[in-house]
């Protein structure tokens, strides 16, 4: 009798564990629309979950639809011109976003040929038109092979950047919430870390601060480090 009761309890515990695991790992669908300050739809905005880029973009009408785990807590949208805004999910299935001001079309203007052209992540700009200090290095040089990692490369090539291990601070930037870390943008997409980037894979690095970094919104308050990588036959 005791053995039978024990087996029944074990079966109930296993069933409960499986049910709880399935519930924890289940997905929920979130939909919404992204507009700018003029209520115009924002197309091709990146969707981020808990600060990480996903493969989802808004459609031409500014709409998005994404499945997330119940463990996820934050959802955000990002455009290179306007930076990122985030919302707490808090069990909501409909979350809309509204950027401040208008979101420019990156294809609306033509780039002018100039001897000093800076890649600011979503378009090229002449250095003399940028209103804040900016620095740039070009990769794919044999001397970069001597650097063990991307942090050594930045410290050795870019003036005005302080690096302690993997911690970076751009001189004369505003500290936000006690943090000195700049925003990282790799191939036009915001990332949380650049640890895995090898110096020989770098095409260029641009450093923005002040008014030049303002195109990325509040996340650019500590400056922006923009890295473009070599791909395929470029290497």
Image (cartoon, helix red, strand yellow):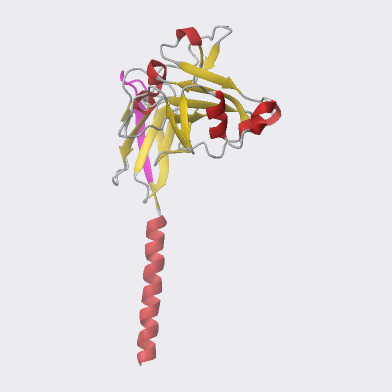
- Quadrant into which the N terminus falls: bottom left
On screen, residue 186 above or below 116: below
Determine if the magenta segment contains residue 34: yes
Determine if the magenta segment contains residue 76: no
What x and y, as percent, mark residue 190? Answer: 46, 32
Report the front residue among 192 and 181. 181
Farthest-out residue, bottom? 1
* Residue 53 appears in the rendering: yes
Report the front residue among 77 and 12. 77
Left or right of residue 230, residue 223 in this image: left
Residue for point 50% across, 21% down = 159
Quadrant of the rendered structure where residue 116 is?
top right
Left or right of residue 133, residue 38 in this image: left
Residue for point 40% across, 77% down = 11
Residue for point 38% across, 32% down = 180
On screen, residue 71 above or below 15: above
What x and y, as percent, mark residue 101? Answer: 32, 18
Report the front residue among 108 and 204. 204
- Quadrant into which the C terminus falls: top right
- The segment highlighted magenta reads 29-41
Quadrant of the rendered structure where residue 14 is?
bottom left
Report the front residue among 144 and 104. 144
Quadrant of the rendered structure where residue 222 is?
top left
What x and y, as percent, mark residue 129? Answer: 46, 8
């Amino acid at each position: 009798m005791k053995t039978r009761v024990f087996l029944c309890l074990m079966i109930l515990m296993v069933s409960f564990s499986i049910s709880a695991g399935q519930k924890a790992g289940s997905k929920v669908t979130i939909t919404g629309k992204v507009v700018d300050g003029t209520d115009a739809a924002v197309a091709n905005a990146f969707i981020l979950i808990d600060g990480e880029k996903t493969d989802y973009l808004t459609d031409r009408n500014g709409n998005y639809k994404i499945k997330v785990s119940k463990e996820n807590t934050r959802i955000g949208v990002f455009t290179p011109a306007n930076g990122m805004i985030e919302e707490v999910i808090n069990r909501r299935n409909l979350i809309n976003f509204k950027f401040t001001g208008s979101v420019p079309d990156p294809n609306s203007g033509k780039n002018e040929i100039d001897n000093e052209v800076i890649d600011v992540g979503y378009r090229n700009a002449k250095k003399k038109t940028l209103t804040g200090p900016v620095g740039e290095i070009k990769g794919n040089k044999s001397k970069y092979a001597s650097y063990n990692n991307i942090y050594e490369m930045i410290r050795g090539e870019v003036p005005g950047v302080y690096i302690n291990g993997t911690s970076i601070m751009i001189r004369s930037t505003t500290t936000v919430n006690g943090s000195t870390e700049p925003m990282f943008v790799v191939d036009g997409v915001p990332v949380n870390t650049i640890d895995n980037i090898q110096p020989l894979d770098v095409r260029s690095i641009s450093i923005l601060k002040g008014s030049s970094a303002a195109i990325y919104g509040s996340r650019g308050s500590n400056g922006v480090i923009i890295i473009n990588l070599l791909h395929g036959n470029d290497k």
